[in-house]
Amino acid sequence: DSRSIGFFASERLYRIDIDGGSLVEVARAPVAAGGTWNSSGDILYTLVPDGPIMRVSERGGPWTETPGSTRQGGNRFPEFLPDGRRFLYYMAGAGMRGVYIGSLDGPTRTRLFDADAAATLLPPDEILFLRAGALYRQHFDYANLRLDGDAVRVAQGIATDSTGAAAVSAADRTIVFRSGAANRLRQLAWFDRAGHPIGQ
């Protein structure tokens, strides 16, 4: 609902309301590898890169493994589909690498396609993925879980890290990405609306 932010810090998953609410510890997350949050208040996340995808309430409490999750190959960077029940995730293990679809409603999982990193949804009807360092976009039928048409290359040299995270984000038909090497330290800088630096 755009009124809260979830984030990982100090081996924990937290949420905070943007209107000034207090910090809420949701769950333990020693080496988090992505998370996603649906409108029903379910959060999916990975405690460690090679662990199963866990499900926890946005209010905290006990967590459980999602149906069909496995400890082999890693289940990383889940992302809910628009229905809030099915989700994408990435597996990086040898012989299993690729983008998969799981569901809160049952153990069935489907391999969607091979990729070098986690995929990103580009609403309302496309998906972004990496192969050989290139970022592609392709039409994706969310309802029937089917790729249509040809993939179109968007950019080259996208940064990824060893867990399979790609430096890519998308919303409202806008794609943001970072190229170059991954895992380098960065310093955030703040600017006012006129473009003048106001601190770090």
Image (cartoon, grey):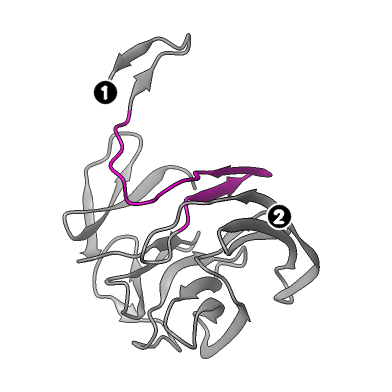
Residue 153 location, x and y as percent?
A: 71, 55
Q: Report the amino acid beneath label 2.
A: Arg
Is 19 located above or below residue 158 in the figure? above
Q: CA distance from mark 1 to mark 2?
A: 35 Å
How many numbered markers are drawn? 2
| Mark 2, residue position | 153
- Magenta region includes residue 167: yes
Residue with the most extreme left position: 10
The residue carrying pointer 2 sits among few (fewer than 14), some (14 to 19) or many (20 or more) residues within 10 Å by Cα, namely some
Residue shown at 46% from the left, 52% from the top: 159
Is 113 located above or below residue 71 in the figure? above
Q: Which residues are magenta?
A: 166-188
In the figure, is residue 10 to the left or right of 91?
Answer: left
Q: Nearer the viewer, residue 38 or 152?
A: 152
- Magenta region includes residue 98: no
In the figure, is residue 33 to the left or right of 90?
Answer: left
Q: Report the amino acid beneath label 1.
A: Gln
Residue shown at 49% from the left, 62% from the top: 38
Residue shown at 53% from the left, 80% from the top: 103
| Mark 1, residue position | 200
Split into 4 quadrants, where in the image is the C terminus? top left
Question: What secondary structure characterizes most of the magenta part?
Answer: loop
Is 2 located above or below residue 30 in the figure? above
The residue carrying pointer 1 sits among few (fewer than 14), some (14 to 19) or many (20 or more) residues within 10 Å by Cα, namely few
